[in-house]
Image: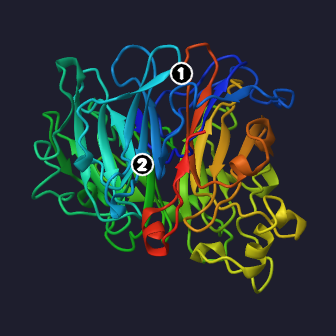
Amino acid sequence: MNFCSYFIPFRTFLLNIAGVGSVFLAGSLCAQVVSVPDNNDLPVSNSDFTDLYLQVAEPRGLGGVVGYGRGASFVDIDSDGDDDLFVADTDGRLFGPPFGISMIYVNDGSGNFLPGEFNLNAADFHGTWVGSFADYDNDGDPDMMVGNGGYTNYSSLVLLENRIDQNQGFVNVTDEAGLGQGSASAEANPWWGVSWADYDNDGWLDVMVTRRMGRPLLFHNQQNGTFDERGGQLGIAEALHQDAKNPVWIDYDEDGDQDVYLAGMDWHAFYRNDGESLTEVTQEIFTEPMEGHSGLPAVFAAASADFDQDGHEDIYLGRWDSQDYIFFGDGAGQFDRVGREGGIDTANHIKQSETDIHPMFNELSIARRNARLNGPSGEESAGIAPYENTMGLGVGDFFDDGFPDIVIGTGEPEFVAADVFLCNRGQRRFERCTDQFVKPDEAHTMTRGHGAVFADVNRDGFTDFYFNLGGHPPFDFAQKAESRETNK
């Protein structure tokens, strides 16, 4: 079982009113491998599927909330058979009360949502970046690990046990689980990614967590409600592990155990699971230089899915300052890299002139700023390429045709930009299809997106998806700005 959590932002809810059937599991941060028998070589043409999605956040109970949106998960929290929603808000605690915190919204079974209490404590959600769900104690319900900190602050890693069936909601068991005082995760850190998998095939889910400073930690499930950190012992190196992003579990060599890719800005790493150890194979996997201006990997978000439906898992690398890539796996440990030639054409690595400073450093050119004064189309009119860094990343099946599609959330604390939708046309080809989901006007092009999550919330057989949006509290505090964004 592979329970992955990754960035899922935007705070818009889009309801699918036509389609076939969802192929993604609720709450998963890594796309699951799905298959379409007998048609792997057929191109998919879904260009006629327009206006299938309606924006329904407000009438469905998810509108009107202003916040600093980060991760999100669809998951059946109360075990009633429908997908509920967790929404991470890295909150405005810097400004004092009132401030928003992360929320759980309960699905009534028809796709309408109400805020749920579940005994959540604001102290457990200080600067939340992600909430990742998995049944770590094998009692049949989803528990939650909360990663707080990110770029907001140094904060806590929190484990919450699901005791809803005992009318206790979620209970903080961080200390009891061996993750608190005296453990490798005891100190405040800028925690970022949380991803679950049974890496040793003992029937109990283990968890990899990353942080912006320090080595990623792999906690082995001791089968008694406690965890033991094994990452260093298994071979995850100490050096150079800075500004880590999300972990992605993927059995790339199809030997029956989960390997892991660790995304990162200053570094990234791929580890092969050899049972008794994790062997780094980064140079073997990434044999070609990855073009980019910074000279760094700059992988801000990553996700796995079988994009070409050949039965083998692939991996998408979403990069902050450079060309995005899909690495198509062959099941034998090798990958084929596809980027711009496959339609993944985001303009996040183009330097327009000497005055257009690279977005990697969060600085923007005078020319771009002036163009923005002329409205959403100002950059295009001035001949300046759009600002399309990959900050958020969502993978899901827009058209229920079996081929995973892609949503890229763009922007940064100081700058908003247009999110990008890439529709999977089959045969390792993608095509921009943003206008089939959101209108190309200021209502959505001016956002800070961090990803998207997918589920069939009203159980009509069609895939719906949710956007979570928001800026950055430290930036607002320092600049006396306002970058929170609102559900749509």
* Residue that mark 1 sits on: 457
Q: Residue at x 45, y 53 (%)?
A: 246
Tell me, for residue 256, which label it has, or none.
Answer: none
- Secondary element at image label 2: strand
Are there few (<14), some (14-19), or many (20+) residues within 10 Å of tag 2?
many
Q: Nearer the viewer, residue 185 or 237?
A: 185
Q: For the residue marked with disc 1, what is the amino acid? A: Val
Report x, y in % for residue 459. 55, 14
* Residue that mark 2 sits on: 89
Q: Nearer the viewer, residue 64 or 129?
A: 64
Report x, y in % for residue 25. 50, 27
Q: Is residue 117 left or right of residue 401?
A: left
Q: Residue at x 10, y 42 (%)?
A: 176
Of marks 2 and 1, the one in the foreground: 2
Say which quadrant the C terminus sits in: top right
- Colouring convention used in this rendered image of the protein: rainbow
Q: How many marks?
A: 2
Q: Measure the C-alpha gap from mark 2 to mark 1.
A: 21 Å
Q: Earlier in the sequence, mark 2 or mark 1?
A: 2
Say which quadrant the N terminus sits in: top left
Q: Is residue 386 left or right of residue 465?
A: right
